[in-house]
Amino acid sequence: MSATLKQVPSRPDYVGVALPFEDVMAPIPKNLPAFMDWPVAGEDPALDAVGLQASEDPNAASESQIAEIVPTGARAILGLVEDRGFSPEELCRGLGFTYRDLSMRDVRLSYRQMRQLFMRAERLLGEPALGLALGARQTPISWGVPGLAMLTCETYGDALTYGLTHQQAIGSMLIHTVEEVGREVRMEVRFKRFDIQLESVLVEDAFAGFVAVSRYVIGPSFAPLRVDFSLPKPSDPEVYRRFFQCPVRFDAGVNRLTIDSHWLSARLPGFDRVNSRIVREQLDSLLPTRGGRNEIVESLSSHLRCDIESTTKQSELASLINVSERTLRRRLSRQDSSYREIRDEARYERARDLLLNSELSIAEIADAVGYSDARAFRRAFKRWAGCLPTEFRESR
């Protein structure tokens, strides 16, 4: 039951123009410095500010440091920076995470960390269409588990609905809403927190990413009817029209992307009613469910979970997340936490998993979570769970 699509009207001003982001970005020389003198958090008010409007919420500053954002945007930024000849490791320096951390499945960043990374990239690259270039790089794989699950949907409309439902798991820093009006589908984006300095890059990235993923899903002929930006007209608006392949309006008073509703019925290639449902259920089980935590706690936890069997010292972990040991202690203290508490939480999480899902002996599990003495592990586990490891395993 394949839907018949209407012929997309020809657009002689736009067709035949290369779509990849390379044509959007000006080339940058490769003989660039590997080291930049970045200010760290607390040293640059422009980087630390959450926005230009003062918030009436006294908790706004602390909320901006909750690590709850899937770092899709951070990965795109660092990929672009690396392509331009800069060191992605240096761009992360002092932000509480490393480039390598972003390859971890469960890593989360705070709004403050994401904001600083975006602003550093803008300062480093000096690109007027940075958001457009970032969005144009995206594919369903860039959107992680939800992006892959979208490929199992029967129609483009189903895929769009799935993506909107899981936009937080995709890593969106904006709120996307869609309304069907007559024969048009209108997508608008709004900010979770006002931030005029990031407005252009985030909105451009959102709309360009939506179009890039849509072209991947249903073909390169996909194009909006029009794109409206509330942003002021840039110095070269033609790059936007070339990418979107439709009229683009600036100073429009709204951030809105409009498509023809006939795209909703477009059938995705490769859809299989039985296997697609099975695969989507499997992917759904991988969607993140853990709530956000303070950024420094999240960074420390991520490192400990990945290297739980070793006896990494606090000073070594501080170095790994680009802060001094003194700063690490102070920040953990502000969160009413400590290195030992976070380490024990990671050990307990891993121990429970091994007790329930492996045949390892208690001594082997003790070694796997960093205890050389099984007796010490038993005492620690009883403190965490209120029972001995063998009792925990038998009760399940």
Image (cartoon, rainbow, N blue to C red):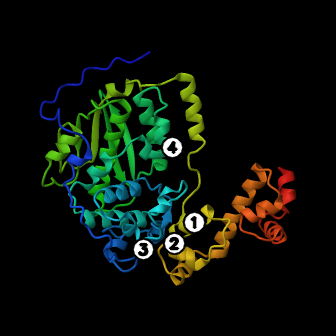
Marks 4 and 3, how far apart in space?
29 Å
Label 4 vs 3, first from the N-terminus:
3
Marks 3 and 2, how far apart in space?
10 Å
Three-letter code, disc 4: Val
User: Mark 3 highlights which residue?
Assistant: 94
Spot occupied by residue 189 in the image (x, y as percentages of width and height): 34, 48
Marks 2 and 4, how far apart in space?
27 Å
Marks 2 and 1, how far apart in space?
8 Å
Question: Are circles 2 and 1 on residues that touch, CB within 8 Å?
Answer: yes
Q: Height in image: 221 above or below 48?
A: above
Three-letter code, disc 1: His
Question: Are circles 4 and 1 on residues that touch, CB within 8 Å?
Answer: no
* Numbered disc 3: secondary structure: loop
Spot occupied by residue 74 in the image (x, y as percentages of width and height): 40, 58
Spot occupied by residue 133 in the image (x, y as percentages of width and height): 27, 50
Q: Height in image: 100 above or below 170?
A: below
User: Mark 2 highlights which residue?
Assistant: 320
Three-letter code, disc 2: Leu
Marks 4 and 1, how far apart in space?
22 Å
Q: Viewer-proximal residue, 39 or 225?
A: 39
Question: Are circles 2 and 4 on residues that touch, CB within 8 Å?
Answer: no
User: Mark 1 highlights which residue?
Assistant: 303
Tell me the mark number nearer the camera, choosing from 3 and 2.
2
Marks 1 and 3, how far apart in space?
16 Å
User: Mark 4 highlights which residue?
Assistant: 145
Label 2 vs 1, first from the N-terminus:
1
Q: Viewer-proximal residue, 139 or 264?
A: 139
